[in-house]
Image: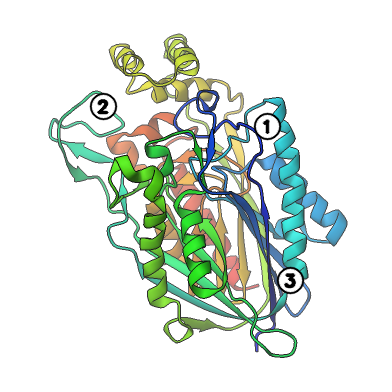
Amino acid sequence: MSDFKVGFGRVNITPDFPAPLDSFGNPLLRIHDRVLSEIYYTAVAITDENDKTLLLTTYDITQCRVDIREEIAKRLQDECGIDPDYFHLSGTHTHSSIAVYVDLPEVKAYRESLIEKGVMACKAAMSDQKPAEIYVGETKVEGLNFVRHYMREDGTITGDNYGYISKAKSFKHMTEADNSLRIIKFVRTQDDNSEAKDIVLVNWQAHNHLTGGQKKTDLSADYSGAIRSWLESEHNCFVAFFQGCAGNLNEKSRITRENRTTNYLEYGRLISEYINEIYDNEKLKKIPSGKVVSIKETIKAKVNRDGLDRLADAQMIKDYRTKHGTTPELKQMAVDMGFHSPAHAAGIVARSKIEEDYIEIPLRVYKAGDVAFSAAPFEMFGKTGKEIREASPFPFTFSQGYTDANYYYLPTDESFEYGCYEVDTTRYVRGTAEQVRDKIIEMLNKLKDM
């Protein structure tokens, strides 16, 4: 029997007002008019034999706001004695959820309700704790994601070098996608040794934007919510989805674009079929129990100043985009003015507002026995997540982006060679992704010895 006790909590966070939806341009131009699937705040509480508790939480929102994370952590410290560094918040990165950063009165009130509901979910998870054994597994999910950077026949790269304008056929992806998927399964028992519901954590990387692909006014948890629905109905378990490093990875839908809105459930089902292949305990590896430990450290990331000599033109493009959205006319205007895209201009404006030359970035790693979790507040590339896992001293590691705060895109060194949307809009100089990767690996090695 494991020395861990593990519990699960979930609270519905679906907005009850017409909410601005994140991603795909100005959220004020995209107000939801239908709930395709409800969204949730999910918490998993893991307590070791020394009564140290790690709270792994995730919500169906694009990114994390640091103020929401910090306020929930403070409440849990004051009311439950939880160390703030042992509280983790991850966004599933669904592109069909409320834009929590918009400063409308109803969104501000929603942010306050998120704090309350996050605390509720965590308390529910702690109350639900039962003895648990840990099983882990990994599989390859073939053909369901791809690198969204590819070469066209005219030599341009999509998202860069007039990528919006070129109609040339694409023929070569710039790198390979990370198609690995990981699960952690907590097999629990009641105090009388009867079975309790298993808790399954899923770590997979691809953009959650199937429902945003066609009808962009549907609110949805997208495919990660579909994975949750399929697995919970098939196995009578609880499921929590933790987004991986998907900064350069899109879904490779087997569903036609016209049917994405109604058939995103099918995409979740396809991924769930791969999980089903390793779900049974005999197909998983049992991990020894041990201590729950967290490490937090910071790095100083150098700010990218590229393009600031063209700030006035960039501001004009951004202002037009804010008012009218990303129209074909704006795309052509941006290219005619020498920008790769309207997003390129918006990235320059965003960088101009950063006064510091360096930004201090928090990084965290956790372990529960021989299972590790890395957490970084960026939209990291799949290559970075894979390299972290491969270099980790732990036999099993979840690598995650979109955690605890939002510090935007973190493109890899090689992506600066060919250029792309993420390079155009990043806040950081070339080499920062490798700096973050090396620091996380260093922290994981330190964690292993604790």
Residue of label 1:
107
Q: Pointers 2 and 1 in contact (CB under 8 A)?
A: no
Q: Quadrant of the C terminus?
A: bottom right
Report x, y in % for residue 371.
56, 72
Report x, y in % for residue 417.
29, 37
Q: Residue furthest left?
A: 153
Q: On the rendered structure, is 347 left or right of 32? A: left
Specify few, some or many for label 2: CA neighbours under 10 Å numbering under 14, 14-19, or 20 or more: many
Specify few, some or many for label 1: CA neighbours under 10 Å numbering under 14, 14-19, or 20 or more: many
Residue of label 3:
128
Report x, y in % for residue 116.
77, 47
Q: Pointers 1 and 3 in contact (CB under 8 A)?
A: no
Q: Earlier in the sequence, mark 3 or mark 2?
A: 3
Q: CA distance from mark 3 to mark 2?
A: 53 Å
The amino acid type found where label 2 is placed reads Asn
Q: On the rendered structure, is 87 left or right of 76? A: left
Q: Secondary structure at mark 2?
A: loop
Specify few, some or many for label 3: CA neighbours under 10 Å numbering under 14, 14-19, or 20 or more: some
Residue 105 lies in quadrant: top right
- Residue at 75% over, 39% down: 112
Q: CA distance from mark 2 to mark 1?
A: 37 Å
Q: Secondary structure at mark 1?
A: helix
Q: Is residue 248 visible?
A: no
The amino acid type found where label 3 is placed reads Asp
The figure's colour scheme reads rainbow
The amino acid type found where label 1 is placed reads Val
Report x, y in % for residue 247.
42, 45
Of badges 3 and 2, the one in the foreground is 3
Q: Secondary structure at mark 3?
A: loop
Residue of label 2:
161
Q: On the rendered structure, is 120 left or right of 232? A: right
Count of numbered badges drawn on the protein: 3
